[in-house]
Image (cartoon, rainbow, N blue to C red):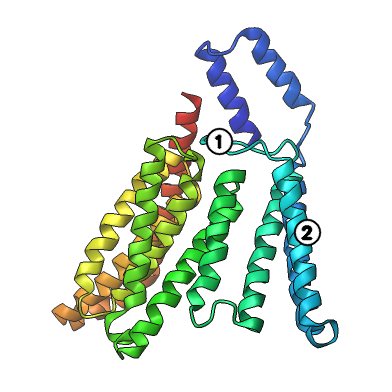
Amino acid sequence: MDSFKEQATQTLFEKKLITDTQFKQVKAYRNLEIFSLNTELKLFLYLSVLFFTTGIGILIYQNIETIGHIAIISLLLVVTVICYYFSFKNSTGYQKGETSFDNPIFDYLILSAVLLTCIFIGYLQFQYNAFGTHYGLATLVPTVIGLFCAYYFDNKSILSIAITGLAAYIGLSVSPQALLSNDFYTTNTLSYSAIGLGIVLVLWSIYSNQIALKKHFTLVYLAFGLHLISISCVTNLFEPYWLIFGVILAAALYYFYISSYKVKSVSLFVFTIIYAYIGVNIILFKAIALLNIDEFLISFFFFVPFYFIISIILFIRLIKKFNKNSNDDSIR
């Protein structure tokens, strides 16, 4: 990493994008070997939120009979309101572009508030059946709150929670209907819903970029879209109508492959390659089974070790190529 930074700085200097004085200042700064603890501190803050909300859940579970339902709900409500109060008080307000708190600790405070909201609403539904038989509302309400907070406070973690809640809501609203009509396993309704949700997320990310609405949320939407569409399509490759899903998978992965270069996300690129590899192998085996070439199958199993070795080498080369192109673009 250090050699790459030095090379990048040298390239900038050779292209006369920085002056000789700036070049020397950069080298002098790097020689100090100062490193940032920003990532580590944020990790500890995130873990503290996770442990806190988990502790609340365990406390409720272990003392539900001794503390009392009203006391638990009241405590949850008070803590949640306090978190929201300080978050709104210290917020810079809603903006279409990227924004942040003056103090990053409030990012985790609003994250705690949203998680506690999910616990509070879930507890109300479980204990008091607040939404009656409309079970999806118990998921939809915190999802809507999460989406609002994600955009108002510009928080990607909350956006991920909200999208997860939206996916859960779709699952809750679809599966009972499919079960009642006895066609859940024959129509794979949830798979279709997942593909539909993935497409909607991708379309929303495109629209958001066009109107410059939280453009930095694009990667979150693309990541969820990739997993939803790819997993659903890969699952349906084992069905009789696998060819349709093979085409959908190929088209989707091509789009995500191009998008990974645009957003310069190595994680998106890696998962795209992995899903493509899985899909190609499934289709390859299905093609061999359809052609019924037993002799070729025996030869293929002989070359399986070499096949995997070549696959690993190509995978590594693709990652290196992606990183090189991304780094070259950043230098330009």
Left/right placement of residue 285 relative to residue 147 reads: left
Q: Quadrant of the N terminus?
A: top right
Q: Residue, x 53% and y 34% (percent of image)?
A: 97
| Res. 174 visible in picture | yes
Q: Quadrant of residue 274?
A: bottom left
Looking at the image, is 143 positioned above or below residue 242?
A: above
> Which residue is at the front of the view, 255 or 34?
255
> Which residue is at the front of the view, 244 or 35?
244
Q: Earlier in the sequence, mark 2 or mark 1?
A: 2
Q: Position of residue 138 (x, y in %)?
A: 55, 72
| Res. 306 visible in picture | no
> Which residue is at the front of the view, 95 or 286?
95
Q: Quadrant of residue 292?
A: bottom left
Looking at the image, is 318 positioned above or below residue 175?
A: above
Q: Position of residue 51 (x, y in %)?
A: 77, 65
Sort mark 1 into few (<14), some (14-19) or many (20+) by Cα contacts within 10 Å.
Answer: some
* Element class at badge 2: helix
* Element class at badge 1: loop
> What residue is pinned by disc 1?
95
> What residue is pinned by disc 2?
48
Q: Residue, x 74% and y 70% (percent of image)?
A: 54
Q: Position of residue 124 (x, y in %)?
A: 65, 76
